[in-house]
Amino acid sequence: MSDLKGKKIILHDMCLRDGMHAKKEQITVEEMVKVATAMDDAGVPYIQVTHGAGVGGNSLQHGFALASNEEYISAVCEQMKQAVVSVLLLPGLGTMKELKSAFDCGARSVHVATHCTEADTSPQHIAFARELGMDTTGFLMMSHLNDAKGLAEQGKLMESYGAHTVYITDSAGYMLPEDVKERISALRDVLNPETEIGFHGHHNMGMGIANSLAAIEAGATRIDGSVAGLGAGAGNTPLEVFVAVCERMGIETGVDLFKLMDIADDIIFPMMDHIVRVDKDSLTLGFAGVYSTFLLHAKRASERFGVPARDILVELGRKKMIGGQEDMILDTAMTMAKERGLLKAVSR
Amino acid sequence: MKKIRCALIGSGNIGTDLIYKVQRSPVLEPVWMVGIDPESEGLARAREMGLKTTAEGVDGLLPHVLEDNIQIAFDATSAYVHAENSRKLNELGVMMIDLTPAAIGPLCVPPVNLKEHADKVEMNVNMISCAGQATIPIVNAVSRVQGVEYAEIVASLSSKSIGPGTRANLDEFTFTTSNAIEIVGGAKKGKALAIINPAEPPMIMRNTIYCLTEGEPERENIIESVLAMIKEVQKYVPGYKLVNGPDFDGNKVSVFMEVEGLGDYLPKYAGNLDIMTAAGTRTAEMFAEEILAGKIQLKPSVAEAEV
């Protein structure tokens, strides 16, 4: 690995947004404020909050959180001393109306997320975020499903709509360091020099840290992670581990390592309903290239219809289902249950 | 048999697919196709199929409306130009079928409320969205049995079937569809989600409909109502198919549908295109049948000022 000493990286914590998936959207406003305040104190510069599926996320498809996004955002923003609070917006689910509402509550940064081949569904949202004066990121989800050249084109589109930063997003935790490096390099080649590049990893194959380092080597300056790895699937790149590695390598993050360790052990771990780690189901996500958020939905469908979660996840991967298609988990489980004689079709 | 003569405005996916649907109708005849790009594939195809064409937009059509006796126009352009198109054509007594998310006229889902609109001789009827056409019949099938406090629909569309207009204006699609789930579907609150999936080979349009009923769902009645509604939609969209459900989980009713198209302009996976054009054509046919039977008469009308 080349010498990264002295590189400055902007960290963006996801445990209060991606981590909502791992908590079935059941983090309380008080918990969110407690975690965010501690991270603010530890010097984390960007903190993403709200429902796991972002603004507009409260739905039967994605679950209902304990509070409205506005309540979470307002409560956290009031306590921030230095951190910028950010949100996620998936066009087709969230709308500009909801983004405006998040902005009014104090959010000043947004990840506008599309599937890695559908950047052209984001122009109005990216332009609107810029109009509001927000730090605006174009977020290319499931990036393993597009090649380097294709991602470069998609990223260029997002830049043309006004994105300050373009992310390669490994939603399935599928990529290996070489895959990351190739994709980030291709983006760096085509984007304007002032446009930043980011990487958002999932730890399903245990590659969160290695992939993030590969991204930095290839030119990324923004890295998403989450304290204690609280996130969908086997979680995001565990932020405190990543910061420790950065310190050893001389990469500058401006974040207090020991404080981050304390947040992980003292606050986040006790909050977890299940230990977020690589297990057979989350590993299956990474191995088969399936959207990390599908994990708990597949486990629930498995309990209802008697088809093992791993079988459902593999079938979803085969059918090339992408982020947002959580309804197809139940549908696939029901179809498989019928094939296995576990469920009868409705008829008249 | 005499047919009602039609103009198709917009030469993209929807406009081009409409040529096939309208040409097949026993009561409609496609006469004009209107575009803005002389090189567009849609206009070329329209000429091949025997339609008159103009690349001058609606203004290129206006001088010919009366001499060619155009009585119904389909607008498949965009929400932004629809109001103007509608105003100009309504003034000449042409009835508008609006396939954009503009929704300046009443919202129409044929098996739910088409008859009502035809009886009122509405001069502008809006077809909501492909997702709306595919899901609102099911929401209505539940809400006609018992109260629905919340309905949510998820439309999965293949990337290849979604044109640039829809992509650039996804919020309009979301708003129009959510609103129609309440107004036409009968849910107290509605929410619409759209997913664009690029898988190869392209996936067939899928729709999931969730309804939260007021109180315990009346299972037997809901199943019967949903199956009956599916048969109604199949009359104009033969590929409208129940895949799973109705599934009951507490007071949540889930229905999983698939829409396979006829494969006219785009291949069969693009059921979203078909259900929109088939619903538009079905709507025009209902008006045409009434006109031909002498039951209704279209009159020039001046649209109310837009605000």
Image: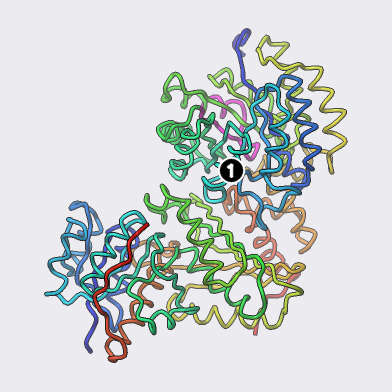
Q: In this view, does B254 lie to the left or right of B30?
A: right
Mark 1 element type: helix
Q: What stretch is highlighted in magenta?
A: A165-183
Does the magenta-highlighted stretch encompass residue B43? no
Does the magenta-highlighted stretch encompass residue A168? yes
Which of the image's four quarters has the N terminus of chain A?
Answer: top right
Q: Which of B65 and A213 is in front in this view?
A: B65
Question: Which residue is depicted at the point 61% across and 45% down?
Answer: A55
Q: In this view, does B296 lie to the left or right of A134?
A: left
Residue A285, by quadrant, is: top right
Q: Which of B208 and B117 is in front in this view?
A: B117
Label 1 CA crowd tier, 10 Å (few <14, some 14–19, many 20+): some
Residue B144 visible here: yes
Q: Mark 1 points at which residue?
A: A101
Residue A207 visible here: no
Q: Where is residue A250 in the image (x, y as percent from the top left)?
A: 68, 9
Question: Which residue is depicted at the point 58% across and 72% down?
Answer: B186
Tell me which chain the residue with mark 1 is part of: A
Query: Measured along the vertical axis of the image, is residue B201 above or below residue A211?
Result: below
| Residue type at numbered disc 1 | Ser
Residue A264, by quadrant, is: top right
Q: Position of residue A70 (x, y in %)?
A: 66, 43
Question: Which residue is depicted at the point 46% across and 56% down?
Answer: B173
Q: Position of residue A292 (x, y in %)?
A: 67, 43
Q: Where is residue B161 in the image (x, y as percent from the top left)?
A: 41, 56
Give the colour scheme of this rendering.
Answer: rainbow
Q: Is residue B67 left or right of residue B138?
A: left
Residue A275, by quadrant, is: top right
